[in-house]
Every structure is written in structure tokens, then in C-alpha cells.
Image (spheres, helix red, strand yellow):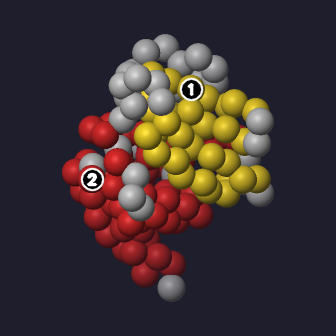
Amino acid sequence: MAEYRLFFLGSDGAIDARQDFIAPDDRAAQQITTVLARATADSHHGVMLWQGTRRIFEEHDGAQPECGTPQSVTADMLAFDTQQRVVECEEALLQSRWCVAKSKMLLAATNDMSRQFKLQRSGRS
């Protein structure tokens, strides 16, 4: 497991918000980033994903990513443990003082993902 930091960028390219999370590898971290970026698209103009001093992914306003490759992944395609990390990140962002906490898309995505996650978890018991 490694620690990652996701930055949400404002229209001027400055960092407006940040979310730290743990993922097993870069692929899972990028999947989490993709889902979180979509869920908060109404409140930022780009995202950057870092692990320590290594930039893994950067995208601004849907333009061609500067590094990494965009993934066409949705929350329901993620492994169970990755879904859990997404829900934890979404809930943390909603409880934060960052601008993304006001995202209506994030609130809706969190409610949907939490509901889906709980159904899957109850099916595993």
C-alpha cells in the first residue's frame, strides 16, 4: 500500500482542495482519482495525482492529460476494497472545508456509491 495525494485545481490552476488516500498501486490510485474527479466535476477545473514527489496524473478541464492515461472507469467497475476507499474519500471531502464540499455532484455520487456499497457489503455477509 502507498499513500497518494489528489489535488483539485481551480480555474487559475491553483490548488483548491486536496484528498489523501491509500491505494495498493498506481492503477488503483488512478481509478480512485477518475471516480472522484467525475464526482466533483462541478467544483474544479482539473486534478493532479501525486505519490510523494512523483506526479502520476494531471488533467485540466478535460484536456489531454499531461501525464498518465485517462481511464474510462466507473465506480461500479471497481473492486470492493477500492469502492470502499472511494466512499471514504467522498465522505471526507463532503465533511471538509474545501470548495468541493459544496459539490452537488459529489453529494449525489456519495449517496449513490454508499447505497451501492452497503448493498454489496450485505450480500457478502
Mark 2 to mark 1 CA distance (whole Å): 23 Å
Res. 90 in view: no
Task: Return the mark for residue 102.
Answer: 2
Q: Earlier in the sequence, mark 2 or mark 1?
A: 1
Give the image quarter of residue 94.
bottom left
Residue beneath the point at 59% across and 17% down: 66
Element type at mark 2: helix
Depth check, front residue: 81 or 100: 100
Residue at image mark 1 = 58
Depth check, front residue: 125 or 74: 74
Would you call the spot at circle 2 few (<14 residues within 10 Å), some (14-19), or many (20 or more)? some
Name the spot of residue 113 as percent of width and height, x first: 36, 61
Depth check, front residue: 71 or 8: 8
Residue 63 vs 71, above or below: the answer is above
Three-letter amino acid code at the position of disc 1: Glu
Residue 69 vs 74, above or below: the answer is above
Res. 36 in view: yes
Depth check, front residue: 73 or 88: 88
Residue 68 vs 52, above or below: the answer is above
Q: Is residue 15 left or right of residue 108?
A: right
Residue 100 vs 85, above or below: the answer is above
Three-letter amino acid code at the position of disc 2: Lys
Name the spot of residue 71 as percent of width and height, x first: 52, 31
Residue beneath the point at 41% across and 61% down: 96
Residue beneath the point at 31% across and 40% down: 43
Residue beneath the point at 67% across and 57% down: 22
